[in-house]
Image (spheres, rainbow, N blue to C red):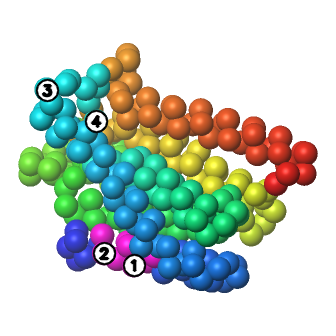
Amino acid sequence: MGAAALYALAALVGGAAFLYRVRRSGSTPRAARSLLWLILGGFLGANLGGATTVISRLTGVALPFALKDYSILGGILGGAIAAALLCRHYALPFWRTTDRGIPALPLALSIGRLGCFVRGCCYGAPADSWLALYLPDRAGVWLPRYPTQLLSAVANLAIFLVLVAVERYGHPREGSVTLLFLALFLIKRFGMEFLRGDALPPVLGPLNSTHLMCVAGLGLVAVLWVRLRGKARQGLV
């Protein structure tokens, strides 16, 4: 199966899982029809780095640090903005709605990383570790490398299973499933960046802009977690 087919499969499986969960939970059908807008928001966010680079070249204004042309982190940000706008437009409770739909995302990302593996992008750094596999980079250079695409696929699938288990057995408070996904994904992405062969150059010690975005994201998750817990104690959530 080619990379394009796996990417399409990821979109189909993730979209089907999202629609199933939304309908099963009894949420309004308008939220299900909003899936296309969520995908569009994620696509635009994922390509924000590339657009910023093009604008920088056209204007001659140098960026303070390098950005990837395509980024899953940007995609999550774009999808979150789209979700917030849709929930506001349809008068849906944001956290309750995202808790229902968010487990579909790591499931889709798990399949999508298999497409990256076939395509050769998001490749690992050369390694002599027991984890290393003989793999190519994007240019077709074969070396023993960390199988970052496969490791990410397994990690994303594990996140999906954790979210489903917490949802079913943990009796989570509103917003907990969404924030748990973000925390686990950002931690995974932070660690995986050290193994990537296409990692951006460091800007702060050993950390590059992807690391810093993960740290900023985790800080935001912590703030949102504290705020939600405070509202829950006051009976506002």
The image shows residue 20, relative to residue 154, as above or below, that is: below
Amino acid type, residue under disc 3 in the picture: Gly
Query: Which badge, 4 or 2, comes first in the chain's sequence?
Result: 2
Q: Quadrant of residue 28?
A: bottom right
Q: Secondary structure at mark 1?
A: helix
SS class, disc 2: helix
Check if mark 3's residue and mark 4's residue have beta carbons within 8 Å.
no
**Label 3 close to label 1 by CB (< 8 Å):** no
- The answer to the question of whether label 1 and label 2 lie on touching residues, with beta carbons closer than 8 A, is yes
Q: Which residue is mark 4?
A: 67
Residue at coordinates 22% horizontally, 53% vertically from top-left?
121
> Crowding at label 3, few (<14), some or many (≥20) Cα neighbours within 10 Å?
few
Query: What is the C-alpha distance between the residues marked 3 and 2?
Result: 37 Å
Does residue 14 sit above or below 209 in this rendering? below
Label 2: few (<14), some or many (≥20) within 10 Å? Answer: some
Residue denoted by label 1: 12
Q: In the depicted view, which residue is nearer to us: 16 or 26? A: 26
Q: Position of residue 222 (x, y in %)?
A: 66, 36
Across and down, in percent, residue 204 comes to: 38, 17
> From this viewpoint, is residue 17 visible?
no
Instruction: State the residue at coordinates (90%, 51%).
Output: 235
Instruction: Identify the secondary structure beneath mark 3.
Output: loop
Density class for disc 4 (Cα within 10 Å; few <14, some 14-19, many ≥20) is: some
Read off the residue under disc 2.
8
Q: Residue flagged by tag 4: what amino acid is it?
A: Leu
When asked about the image quadrant of residue 127, the answer is top left
Q: CA gap, disc 4 to disc 1?
A: 29 Å
Query: Which one is earlier in the sequence, the residue at label 4 or at label 1?
Result: 1
Q: Amino acid at mark 1?
A: Leu
Q: Which residues are magenta?
A: 7-15
**Residue under circle 3?**
60
Residue occupying the point 51% across, 49% down:
185
